[in-house]
């Protein structure tokens, strides 16, 4: 059963939550995706962004409704646990943690690789591990001091990561060649579907920003508004970036390993290349900062609701009013996985695991429509069940296109977690 967050402070406003959502969605992917989209669809790649934007908007509408109704910390785990009980909550929470921990490991190592090009000392294994330790536990320390400090850092990093992108857009738009962005032949549905499968995952992550719901001011209104502002902002930036990259580089875009940096070099010289390369590093660091702000709240919520029998994760610091032990534990786990560098299996779990989370949230919206009355001030998606059913269709479509290996690893993970829950967790809770 979900318990209220009585000890946490509601200090996050509309701008803070919107920044948190944007920060998590715009990670390192946008710095390489334009080339991947160009390979699949050429000048018509912008259509894939629009297609994915519409699909993720449908799903995030479901998050907006359930997030307006359930305002405790924990994000999608809390929504699924409220609708379907402890077992579903246990599966959701643990798959969610595994999903994001794997992404943290990948992004933190990518950050080291980028910095190693400028600071060769980071190629040493000992220095690399020390750097990862400082990143994970430094961010943990900032977030333990208070959610205001954590969100303050997020606001700064969002501005720092978006400014280079906006600079590229502003300076690049006048240099677009219309020949490069002219769509002569519309893509086939197969082309659109195949490209969208890759691109869709550049749009996910907004749900992670909702893990701090228990610390949001006026959550019934600010949560839906922040979701809309976040998704719209990301979609506009993504489309403009793809237009500039395609319009400036043309067919050469498909061959670039660092497409945005190369576009910037073409637009405003080597300085542009350096700015966008630095922007990629800031973006990755921003993602890490967002994870260590948001994800410990899932661990805290799992303990708070006694879905996992570890009371310590549910403790809140008497002075700073933050779940300090959950933050330290999450940072420690992320550091260990990143330092070992063996996160391939978890990365496979991430794909199927996150889609299953989305499926659970959409089903939660449908169930709560019939089991809980909508209270005054809560957001409700217009059009009856149209949006939830379209969202279900979208998720099933993407799930059906996962590889056999991804489906197998995801299924085995669910079986293993189910065994742990039914034979250990339930007994410990009694």
Image: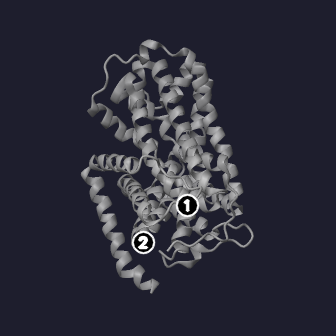
User: Extreme right residue here?
Assistant: 319
Q: Is residue 306 visible?
A: yes
**Marks 1,2: beta carbons within 8 A:** no
> Furthest residue to the left?
404
> Distance of mark 1 from mark 2, alpha carbons?
22 Å
Badge 1: how crowded within 10 Å, few (<14), some, or many (20+)?
few
Residue 225: give x, y in percent of width and height.
59, 46
**Looking at the image, which residue is at 70% across and 58% down?**
11
Name the residue tied to disc 1. Answer: 375
Tell me the residue that label 2 is attached to: 85
**Local secondary structure at mark 2:** loop
Q: Position of residue 149 (x, y in %)?
A: 71, 55
Q: Residue at x 67, y 57 (%)?
A: 217
Visual colour scheme: one colour
Out of 241 and 183, give the one closest to the viewer: 183
Q: Is residue 83 above or below residue 266?
A: below
Query: Observer-nearest residue: 110 or 12?
Result: 12
Q: Measured from the top left, where is residue 312 in percent x and y?
A: 58, 76
Q: Nearer the viewer, mark 1 or mark 2?
A: 1
Specify the quadrant of the image occupied by residue 197: top left
Circle 2 residues within 10 Å: few <14, some 14–19, many ≥20: some
Q: Nearer the viewer, residue 188 or 4?
A: 4
Point out residue 75 in the picture as x, y percentages from the top left corner.
Answer: 52, 59
């Amino acid at each position: 059963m979900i318990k209220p967050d009585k000890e946490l402070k509601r200090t996050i406003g509309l701008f803070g939550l919107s920044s948190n959502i944007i920060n998590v969605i715009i990670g390192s992917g946008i710095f390489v995706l334009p080339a991947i989209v160009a390979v699949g669809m050429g000048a018509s790649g912008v259509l894939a962004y629009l297609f994915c934007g519409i699909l993720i908007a449908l799903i995030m509408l479901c998050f907006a409704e359930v997030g307006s109704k359930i305002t405790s910390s924990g994000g999608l785990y809390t929504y699924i646990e409220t609708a379907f009980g402890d077992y579903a909550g246990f599966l959701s929470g643990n798959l969610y943690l595994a999903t994001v921990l794997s992404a943290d490991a990948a992004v933190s190592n990518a950050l080291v690789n980028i910095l190693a090009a400028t600071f060769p000392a980071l190629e040493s294994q000992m220095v690399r591990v020390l750097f990862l330790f400082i990143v994970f536990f430094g961010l943990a320390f900032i977030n333990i001091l208070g959610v205001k400090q954590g969100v303050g850092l997020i606001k700064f990093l969002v501005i720092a990561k978006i400014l280079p992108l906006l600079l590229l857009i502003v300076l690049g738009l006048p240099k677009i060649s219309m020949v490069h962005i002219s769509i002569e032949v519309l893509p086939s549905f197969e082309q659109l579907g195949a490209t969208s499968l890759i691109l869709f995952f550049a749009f996910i992550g907004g749900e992670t920003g909702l893990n701090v719901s228990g610390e949001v001011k006026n959550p019934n209104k600010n949560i839906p508004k922040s979701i809309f502002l976040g998704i719209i902002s990301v979609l506009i930036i993504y489309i403009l970036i793809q237009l500039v990259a395609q319009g400036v580089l043309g067919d050469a875009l498909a061959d670039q390993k660092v497409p945005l940096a190369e576009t910037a070099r073409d637009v405003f010289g080597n300085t542009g290349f350096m700015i966008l390369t630095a922007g990629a590093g800031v973006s990755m660091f921003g993602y890490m900062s967002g994870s260590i702000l948001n994800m410990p709240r899932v661990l805290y919520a799992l303990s708070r609701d006694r879905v996992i029998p570890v009371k310590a994760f549910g403790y809140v610091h008497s002075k700073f009013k933050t779940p300090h032990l959950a933050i330290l534990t999450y940072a420690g786990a992320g550091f260990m996985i990143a330092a070992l560098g063996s996160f391939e299996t978890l990365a496979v779990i991430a794909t199927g695991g996150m889609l299953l989370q989305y499926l659970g949230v959409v089903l939660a919206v449908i169930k709560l429509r019939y089991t809980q009355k909508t209270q005054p001030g809560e957001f409700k998606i217009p059009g009856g069940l149209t949006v939830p059913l379209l969202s279900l269709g979208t998720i099933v479509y993407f799930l059906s296109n996962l590889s056999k290996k991804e489906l197998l690893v995801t299924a085995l993970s669910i079986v293993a977690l189910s065994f742990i829950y039914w034979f250990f967790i339930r007994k410990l809770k009694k």
